[in-house]
Amino acid sequence: MKPPFVITVDGPAASGKGTIASRLAADHGVQMLDSGLLYRAVGGLLAAEGKDLDDVEAATAVAEGLTVEQLSNPAFRTRAAGELASRVAVHVPVRNALFRLQKSFCLRPEGAVLDGRDMGTVICPEAPAKLFVTARPEVRAERRWKQLTGQGEPVTLEDILEDIRKRDERDGGRAASPMRQADDAVLLDTSEMTIDHAADAARRIVEAARARWERS
Ligand code: DC
């Protein structure tokens, strides 16, 4: 039996993958999983308990007890929460604790869109449509800086670039499910694209995958 039509969208921070993933989910009328939010919630809740981010046991207990209701906290969307997320995401037991919830999305009969770092490689390797969305670090830093200063957060471009480089290194260099392009994922470099242009390019890639999936 062929797998449901699941779309995975992986890539580094501020590449445009979140916007692309939500537009694809709207196009296809399916649910989207923002897997980064799970790690953000684990990091944020652990820090709120005053625990060390390297305390694997405590982090795993938070991941195991995580509920969907806890995810709506806006504090998990901040720049600081992204850093906490990347720190707890290196722990294998934390990743294991979050596996089942993520896997359930790729088993939905109507399909789904999964956004993250290891969706196409680890969580849903059988997905019929895979994208790896990236952009040069300088471009991503500028996008993120504009967004944050627009929201009134006083940050410098240099600090954001430093954050992005550190996060790329940690997410791509860790032993457990590192961020990497799946062999069968299509690379979309959005460095020279507007978000609308990037979303259109993603839509075309997914339409081609959908046609192949329908014929299979
Ligand atoms: O996509 P994001 O910025 O919300 O992700 C925050 C961090 O969570 C990211 O730097 C690494 C981690 N993460 C992960 O390890 N695996 C995922 N599938 C998604 C996010």
Image: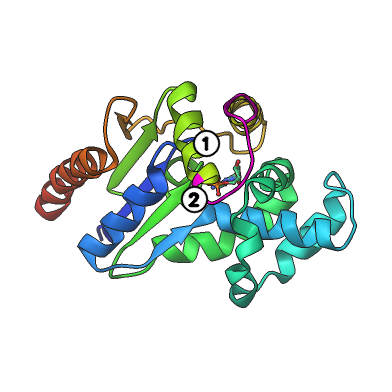
Q: Can residue 126 be seen in the rendering of this structure?
A: no
- In this image, 68 relative to 114: left or right? right
Find the distance from the CA under tag 2 to the CA under tag 1.
31 Å
Residue 39 in the image: x percent, y percent?
64, 53
In the depicted structure, whether residue 215 falls above or below residue 164: below
Residue at (59% x, 38% y) in the render: 177
Report the residue at 24% width, 68% height from top. Answer: 29
Percent of width and height locating residue 195: 29, 41
Task: Assess whether residue 156 is covered by the magenta stretch.
Answer: yes
| Residue 30 location, quadrant | bottom left
> On the picture, is 212 further left or further right than 116?
left
| Residue nearer the viewer, 161 or 90 | 161
The residue to which callout 2 is attached is: 123
Asked if ligand 1 lies within 8 A of label 2, the reply is yes
Q: Quadrant of ligand 1?
A: top right
Q: Are marks 2 and 1 in contact (CB under 8 Å)?
A: no
| Nearest to the observer: residue 43 or residue 157 | 157
Front position in the image: 149 or 58 = 149
Q: Which residues are magenta?
A: 150-159
SS of the residue under disc 1 = helix
Q: Residue at x 53, y 51 (%)?
A: 151
> Which amino acid type is marked by label 2?
Ile
Please say whether residue 215 is visible from this viewpoint: yes
Q: Give the image location of residue 156, x and y in percent.
A: 62, 30
Depth-wise, is mark 2 or mark 1 nearer the camera? 1
The one nearer the camera, 4 or 62, is: 62
Q: Which residue is mark 1?
A: 145
Q: Could you classify mark 2 by the number of other residues whose Cα lies within 10 Å: few (under 14), some (14-19), or many (20 or more)?
A: many
In percent of the image, x 78 and y 58: which residue is there?
A: 60
Q: Secondary structure at mark 2?
A: helix
Name which residue type carries label 1.
Answer: Trp
